[in-house]
Image (cartoon, rainbow, N blue to C red):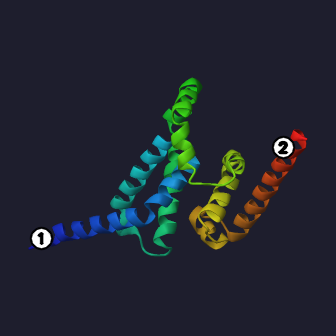
Amino acid sequence: MGFFLKHKQKDNKTAEIERMIDTYGNDVLRTAYMYLKDTQKAEDAFQEVFIKVLKNYDRFKGHSSEKTWLMSITINTCKDILKSFWSQKVVQEEEYLMNAMNDDIEKEAIWNIENEQLYKRVLELPVQYKEVIIFFYYHSYSTVEIGKILGVPEGTVRSRLTRARDTLKKQIVERSEAVE
């Protein structure tokens, strides 16, 4: 009887993970892509996130929403990937060739963001500004939710949002003046 119950629990856990992938998978993949700027790395991060979720599913206590929990895992996974030895040692020429080959795929992966220049500017922001912009504008999280995801006070999130907006505004003004 004990074997049967254990097996049934695994089936329920697997079903829950599948539900989470169906519900939040696109958000996880999109966030990973915005962090890593590479389709393959984003897909690897996606897999790693849900492996971590499977291993740690029983630890989720519901102190935040499932989506907030998943986004925290996604960010930490992306940061780990960016810190990894392999990411630090990528040859620029190889990256250039991969970007040229994946250009069409990457443009499709931008998910219809109307202003591609603004998107590129957001990706060039320092990480602490980029992440608040992505969560606030692209995922529609509140500053309270972003604070929970990033583990920082809401005031810090608001301050980073203001600085990120000011930085983007300054870049846009400088670009428009350079064109004139």
Q: Residue at x 48, y 57 (%)?
A: 28
| Residue 170 relative to residue 120: left or right | right
Q: Secondary structure at mark 2?
A: helix
Counting from the top left corner in percent of width and height, residue 2 is at 12, 72
Q: Residue at x 55, y 26 (%)?
A: 91
Amino acid type, label 2: Arg
Q: Is residue 73 visible?
A: no
Mark number, residue 126: none
Determine which residue is flagged by label 2: 175
Q: Nearer the viewer, residue 1 or 143?
A: 143
From the image, which quarter does the N terminus lie in? bottom left
Q: Residue at x 56, y 37 (%)?
A: 103
Q: Nearer the viewer, residue 162 or 147?
A: 162
Vertical relation: 95 (above or below) 140: above
Mark number, residue 4: 1
Vertical relation: 90 (above or below) 16: above
